[in-house]
Amino acid sequence: RALHRNGFRWRLRVRVVPHTWRPVRVGAPLLGWVLVYVVAGQIGVWVTMKVTLSRHVYSMYTHADLLFQVAYGILGVSLLTVLMPRIARSVAAGDDVGVVSDLGRGARYSVVALIPVTVALMVFGPSLTTLIFFGRVDGSSARLIGTAVAVSAFGLVPFAMVMLQLRVFYADNNTRTPAVIALVMVVAKTALVLLASLSASDETLVLAVCAAGSFSYVCGAALGHILLRKRYGLLGFRRVQATVGRISAAAILAGGCALALVVAVQNRVPEPRLAAVISLSAGAVVGAVVLLGACKVVGVPEIRRARALLLS
């Protein structure tokens, strides 16, 4: 094809690339299961919205859910960002041993990071929301949001496990299994939400919806573990169980000390906001000191390795 510009004649050669349907044939099934995953999630969101909006507790539920997500977003997402390239390389190389090793490493670091946060949310949830939402909602509503966070905190670790498991499946170009896991989680959550909507009061419904979401994460993590074990064999989770036992013992001890301090402050300080400030500040210091001391006594190697990594 000839082009004329400024008195010069330019000749442009166009190379025609042969048409192929191979990318479409490969990508269509992957995209289809991704759409199933998305649609399933949106169905769960729609059911939850309809139930909570009909009972006028949607805003309290969303605030509690956002606080739950913040705890995961700060720690869990950072961990996945570090592990995902390693997992992808192992899957691409066909290194099943490497995949299992990285999966176990991610699980251990997740529980070490998130179990203390889980206990902290259970202990400080009402005090935290009393301070955050002071002047925006009444005191009882603020404490109800915090109680919902505390009730749903048990799902923090299972949620992190599900996100880690899905990354392994995605690295293997498997979008069907994440869609199946999502469907199971949506069915579990919507069933509990609809059951709670039949008999629970407005205040109890907020707690039930948040707890239902966390229970669905437990179901998803259990199913994901079964499917990963079917694909890769034994996952070496005995080390994860040992880490869970040690960090749980340390976190429960620290949480018990912090809870005793919170109760003492709330009984002695009548003003809610001042009591929340004192409870959070003093309880966080006491809990952190006890947690670190207990971890040193019981021995949590992941903390030592993380500390060495940061110092290096």
Image (cartoon, rainbow, N blue to C red):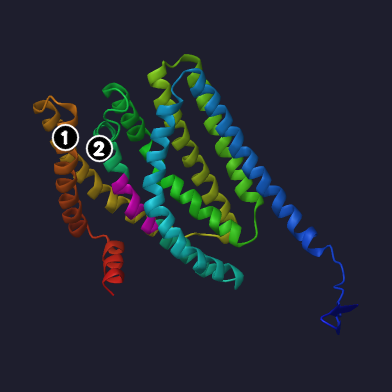
Q: Position of residue 21 (x, y in %)?
A: 84, 62
Residue 26 magenta-drawn?
Answer: no
The residue identified by callout 2 is: 124
- 299 relative to 189, above or below: below
Pointer 2 local density, CA inside 10 Å: few below 14, some 14–19, many at least 20: many
Q: What stretch is highlighted in magenta?
A: 108-117
Residue found at the far front of this picture: 7
Q: How far apart are marks 2 and 1 (CA)?
A: 8 Å
Q: Residue at x 59, y 57 (%)?
A: 169
Amino acid, disc 1: Val
Residue 111 magenta-drawn?
Answer: yes
- 49 relative to 112, above or below: above
What secondary structure is found at the residue carrying circle 1? helix
Q: Quadrant of the N terminus?
A: bottom right
Number of disc labels = 2
Amino acid, disc 2: Phe
Q: Residue at x 55, y 38 (%)?
A: 185
The residue identified by callout 1 is: 262
Q: Quadrant of residue 77?
A: bottom left
Q: Which residue is drawn at 44% across and 33% down?
A: 62
